Amino acid sequence: MSPGPAPIALPFGGPGSPVRIESLGPRARFALRLRQDHGFARVEESFGLALPREACRFNEGADRRALWLGPDEWLLVAPYDQAGAIVTEVQAALAGIPHSMVEVSHRSLGFALTGPKAASVLASGCPLDLDLRAFPVGMATRTVLAKTEIILQRIGAEEFQIDVWRSFANYTLGYLIEAARSYD
């Protein structure tokens, strides 16, 4: 069995580059399903961050982020070394409240795209309108990039983060780098 393609070297682009692509490193990720409003306050207290209530938005603190992905679905993201404590604290806080919380840390990889051409690079394969007025800072949603499902977040005017399933990471990075080369 062949070992598969070699991983793509990151970061791509240097200081002053119109597009820079970097790995975000390991992160703890949890898929949380919750319908009962009184559970929201318990998550906020135990996770240290409010669940966003507005569609396709995220809330963030110093080192954690909560993304609204659906009417009863959130993605909780934190430093990888906090995963065990988060499971213990959030599960205890939600005891007795119907919910589902699954650790999906190893499913996805995260990447940052920054620079004045970051939106243009993404737009080459993403059907969303990435104009700042249509996709403002604080927005997060599932979408596609080329042939891959991603979770796209706008962190700043010229800064995006992508979560992509690990098995599609090389393809996605290869696509982004090819699109970014047209701006070098």
Image (cartoon, grey):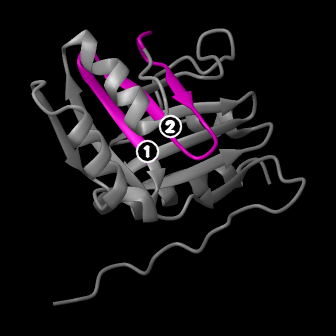
Q: Relative to the observer, which residue lies in front, 111 or 183? A: 111
Q: Is residue 159 above or below residue 174?
A: above
Residue 42: where, in percent of width, then height?
32, 26
Extent of the magenta region: 53-77
Q: Is residue 110 above or below residue 61?
A: below
Q: Look at the image and tell me in which quarter the N terminus lies.
A: bottom left
- Residue neighbourhood size for the residue with mark 1, other residues' Cα within 10 Å, grouped as few (<14), some (14–19), many (≥20): many
- Residue 117 in the figure: left or right of residue 47: right
Would residue 22 be found to the left or right of residue 55 on screen? right
Residue for badge 2: 65
Q: Residue at x 47, y 49 (%)?
A: 78
Q: Quadrant of residue 148?
A: top left
Helix, strand or loop for disc 1? strand
Secondary structure beneath dot 2 equals strand
Residue 38 sits inside the magenta stretch: no
**Residue ID for mark 1:** 77
Q: Return the mark for residue 41.
A: none
Position of the C terminus, as image quadrant, is bottom right
Q: Residue at x 56, y 42 (%)?
A: 161
Task: Report the front residue among 74 and 126.
Answer: 74
Camera-side residue: 2 or 79? Answer: 79
Q: Residue at x 59, y 17 (%)?
A: 135
Residue at 41% x, 38% y: name it. Answer: 47
Three-letter residue code for mark 1: Val
Q: Position of residue 48 (x, y in %)?
A: 48, 35
